[in-house]
Image (spheres, coloured by chain):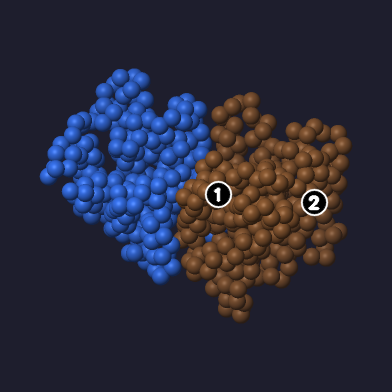
Chain colours: A blue, B brown
Amino acid sequence: MRAFQILIDGFAISALYALGATGFTLIFGVSGVLNLSHGAIMVAAAVAAWAAASLLNVGTYAGALIGVGVALLTAFATYFAVVKPIQDSRRIPNEEKEIFVLTGTLLWGIMIQELIAYFFTNNAKTVLPIVEGVVDILGVRTPKNEIFTAIVCCLVIALLWLLVNRTRTGKAVLAASMNPRGVTLLGLELTNIYIVVWAIYGILAGIAGVLLGMFLGVSSYSVGPLTASAFSIVVLGGLGSVSGSLIAAFVVGYLETLTAYLVSPAYRTIPALLLLVFVMYIRPQGLLGRR
Amino acid sequence: MAGFFTSRLFFVSLALVVVAATLPLYVSGYVLGLLTVAFYFGVFAMAWDLLFGFAGEVNFGPTFLIGVGAYTAGILNAQFGWSVYLCIVLGALASVIAGLVLALPALRVRGPYFGLTTLVAVLMLQNFVVVFADLTGGEIGLTIPDVITINAGANYWIALGFMTISAAILYGLSQSPVGLVLQASGQDPVQAGALGFNIVKHKLAAFIVSAFFSGLSGALLVFYFGTASVGTVVDVAVGVNVIVSAVLGGRRTVLGAALGAIFLIVAGEFLRPTGELATFIVSAIALLVVLFFPGGFLGAALSREARS
C-alpha cells in the first residue's frame, strides 16, 4: 500500500521536476545560457495565477493562462534586458560572458523575488486547482490535482519533443544548438531562433510554475530552492541533454519521496544532494552529458 | 609589485585606511557597527575574488567556507567553553580542511559544474545545521557566550585592521608569480598547462588561502555578533551578496571586492527607509553596473587612470 503511494506521489513530483528542468536545459543546450532567474520566473507565474484567480476572480482556467502569460513576458524581459545586452557587449571579454550572464540573471531573479515579496508579501500562496477532489487508486487516496499535474507535465514534454524533432522551427533550434555559426550561413537569423527558444522556455516555466502553485504552493522564499533544484537536476542529467534531465528528475523525485516516507521529511533533500556529489565525482559531465 | 608602493592606488588606499581609522573619534556607534560588519564582508569578498577573479572559477559556495569557520568557532565556544582566540584559530583551520575536502572533487570539474558542486556544499551545510540542531542551535541559531569586546570602537578597529592586513596579503598574493600563474590558468588553462605550470596545485593553493581568510573572517564575525545562524553566515543569499560585492567592486582587483562589500552593506542601510524595496534597489544598481560598467567600480577607475 505504502509502496504504491510512494510510486504515485513520486511520479507526480518527478514529472513536475522534469518539466521545471526541461526549459532550463533547453536554453542552455541551444545558447549556452544558465538562467539563474529560473526560480523567480516560475514563482512569478504561480503568484500571477493565484492573484488573478483569488483576487480578481477570473476563474481557475483564465488564472492559469494569465500565469503562463506572465512567465512568457518575464522570460522575454530576461532575454532582452539582461542576457542579450551581456552577449552583445563589447566591454565584456568573450570568455567571461558566461559568468556575467550568471551574475546578471541572478540579480534579475532577486529583483523579481523582491517585487513579488513587496506586492504580495512573503506568505505562501496556493493556486486554486483546476480539478478538485480525491480518487481512490487501489486503496491509495490520491488528489485528482496530483494526477492532473502528472498528466499535464507528461503531455507538455511530449509536445515539446514533437516540436523539436518534427517541425521546421524545431529543427532550426536543434541545428542552432549544434552549430550556431553554421545556422547563420544557412540564412537563419540566430536572434530569431533564440527568441523562439526563450518563448518556449517561458511557456514551459510558466506551466511548471502554475502547476507547482496548485500542487505544493509557492512563496517568494521558493525562488532560490527552485533555481537550485532545477540546476542540480540539469547538471546531474548532463548540461544541455533534455533526456538526461528527464532521467535525473525522476531519480531525484523518487529519492526525495522515498526518503520523506521511509526516513523523515526533514532529511528529504539530503540523499539527492549526496548522490549529486557522488555522480559529479565519478562522472563530472553528468549522466548523459557530453564533455 | 614594487611599483605598487609608488602607484596612485597605494596612496589612495593608505589615505582611505587612515581616514577610516579615525572614524570612532566622531561617528556614532551605530555607524561603526554597520562598518564593522561591512569590513568582515569585505574580507569574504576579497577571498572570493582570489578564487574567481584569478583562477576563473565561479565559487557559488563562499558561505560554505565562511559557515564552517563561523560554526566551528561558535560551537567550540558555546558547547565546550573554549577560549575565544583558540576558537577563532580552530575555526579558520576547520575552514581550510573543509576547503580541501571541497576542492578535491570540485577542481576536477570546470565552469557550471564547479559552480554547482560548491552550491551543493552550501545546501549540505545548511541541512547539517538544521538536522544537528542540538549542536548547532538549528534554525533559531547558536548563542555564543563570549565576545572579543563589547566596545564598539575596539570592535571597529579590530575589523578594520583585520581587513587591511587581509587586503595587503591577498593583493600581494594576486600580484605575485603565483597570482600571475593563477590568472593565466583562469584565462587559458590549456596554454598555462603547456608552459609547465601545475594548474591544479596552484588552484588548490588559491582555494586554501581563500578558505583560510573566509573562515577566519566568519569566526571573527561570530564573536562580534554573539550568535551564529544560517541566515547570517551560511545561506545562499549571503553568498550572493559576497559574489555581487566582488563583481560590483571590480573582479580581479581584490581591493575592489572590499569596496563593493562596503558599498553593498552601507547602501542597504541607507535604503532601509524604503522598507522591503531596499534589496530590490541594491540589486537593480548592481545589475546596471554589471551591464554598463562590467569592470566594476575599481575596474572603471583603474582603466581611466591607465588611459590618462
A3 and A26: which is toward the camera = A3
Residue type at mark 1: give it: Thr
**Residue positioned 62% across, 43% down in the render:** B143
| Residue B258 appears left or right of A9 | right
Q: Is residue B1 above or below residue A87?
A: below
- Residue, far bottom: B196
* Callout 1: chain: B
Q: Quadrant of residue A96?
A: bottom right
Position of residue A29 measured from the top left corner of the image (x, y, whole percent) = 37, 56
Q: Is residue B23 above or below residue B207?
A: above
Position of residue B99 measured from the top left corner of the image (x, y, whole percent) = 58, 63
Q: Quadrant of residue B5?
A: bottom right
Q: Could you say whether the residue bearing mark 2 is in a helix, strand or loop? A: helix
Q: Could you say whether the residue bearing mark 1 is in a helix, strand or loop? A: helix
* Callout 2: chain: B
B191 and A135: which is toward the camera = A135
**Residue positioned 23% across, 44% down in the render:** A150
CA distance separating discs 2 and 1:
29 Å
Position of residue B65 measured from the top left corner of the image (x, y, whole percent) = 59, 56
- Residue, far front: B80
> Can see residue A172?
no
What residue is shown with label 2?
B161
What residue is shown with label 1?
B136
The quarter in which the N terminus of chain B is drawn is bottom right
User: Which one is in front in this view, the residue at disc 2 or the one at disc 1?
Assistant: 1
Q: Earlier in the sequence, mark 2 or mark 1?
A: 1
Q: Is residue A8 above or below residue B50?
A: above
Q: Residues within 10 Å of mark 1 (few under 14, many from 20)?
A: many
